[in-house]
Image: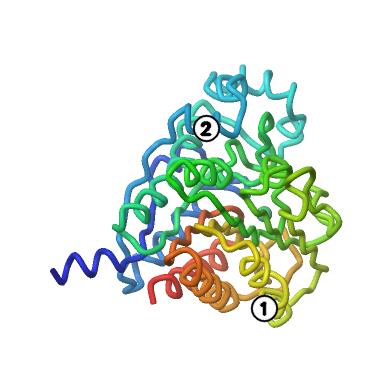
Amino acid sequence: MFWNYFIYMATALVSFEEHNLHNEPSHSENAERVNAILKAIGSSKLPLLHLKARKAAKEEIIKVHSNEFYDYLSKPAFEVIGALTRFNDELYSGDTYFTDRTFEAALFSAGSVLTAIDAVKEGRAKNAFALSRPPGHHAEKEEAKGFCFFNNIAIAARYAQGKGFSKVFILDFDVHHGNGTQHIFYEDNSVFYCSTHQWPLYPGTGKADETGEGKGRGFTLNIPLKAGTTSERYLELMKEKIIPAIDSFKPDILLISAGFDAHKDDPLGDLELDAECYGRMAEMLKASAEKYCNGRIIFSLEGGYNVKALADSALEVLKSLSA
Ligand SMILES: [Zn+2]
């Protein structure tokens, strides 16, 4: 009885060794990122329910991406790079690398968030954090870019809806705007997309006046931040804008695109957040999830390129989730 209770109350950590299949040590988006988080968790005494990610199935992925795009990514790297130029010139710029094993890693990455949703849906965990990599929020319906192949959080949103969680609120606190996620749900009023990001910065989307179109108008909220924005200011914005947006939408599940590259030590961004700020944000979001979603909140890793800052920040989030 005690163990059933304990397991039900646990925070799930979803990981998978197959992320190592997609690795280029000299690139910012390398396998050490997740391995550093796992190491930090190993030395902590956090009571987490460790789950192995499953692969996402093709039918789950093509609810967001086109059939053709899925088939292209499944091909050997040299063919994919050739084919992807039809979608994306970034591959030649050195921004996004692709190997013969990338497709396999990307299937697990998308699947890790689905495993997290299953654990929460089935009552095996109260909330969850999926160590998804490669990341996903820059991936468009038919375009791999910004180190991303499949849009993990968007695939998870559609999957959650299929499981009965009709209204999905996505908060994306990566330092970069999640162009892919925004575009996928831009005309959709069942998925609210909210992003905080440094402005101006890659990928160039995410202006405050991008608020959705058609029946999706008013269901996209962009909060561009200037370089130097501090933890203190960020937490004020949580209270002034983000929590009220959740309050007005009243979601059935909260999904978080959790990039930690807004940390002050990150090499790719110029915001000034610290690890404690991420823990505090997670606490506030968890309270919203308890208010509207019976506690259902799932974090999916996006960016974060200073491995120490990344591991410290992820650990703060896990402390708040499992408290
Ligand atoms: Zn990022």
Q: Is residue 221 left or right of residue 293?
A: right
Q: Is residue 10 above or below residue 143?
A: below
Tell me where residue 259 sits by quadrant.
bottom right
Q: How many marks?
A: 2
Residue under circle 2? 61
Tell me where residue 231 sits by quadrant.
bottom right
Spot occupied by residue 234 in the image (x, y as percentages of width and height): 70, 75
Residue, x 25% and y 64% (percent of image)?
Answer: 7
Q: Quadrant of ligand 1?
A: bottom right
Residue, x 40% and y 40% (percent of image)?
Answer: 18
The C terminus is located in which quarter?
Answer: bottom left
Tell me where residue 10 sits by quadrant.
bottom left
Residue under circle 1? 239
Residue, x 69% and y 24% (percent of image)?
Answer: 84
Going by the numbered disc 2, the residue's amino acid type is: Ile
Q: Secondary structure at mark 1?
A: helix
Residue, x 69% and y 31% (percent of image)?
Answer: 143
Spot occupied by residue 24 in the image (x, y as percentages of width and height): 56, 41
Which badge, 1 or 2, is on the more N-terminal residue? Answer: 2
Mark 2 crowdedness (10 Å alpha carbons): few <14, some 14-19, many ≥20: many
Spot occupied by residue 187 in the image (x, y as percentages of width and height): 73, 42
- Tag shown at residue 182: none
Q: Is residue 224 left or right of residue 165?
A: right
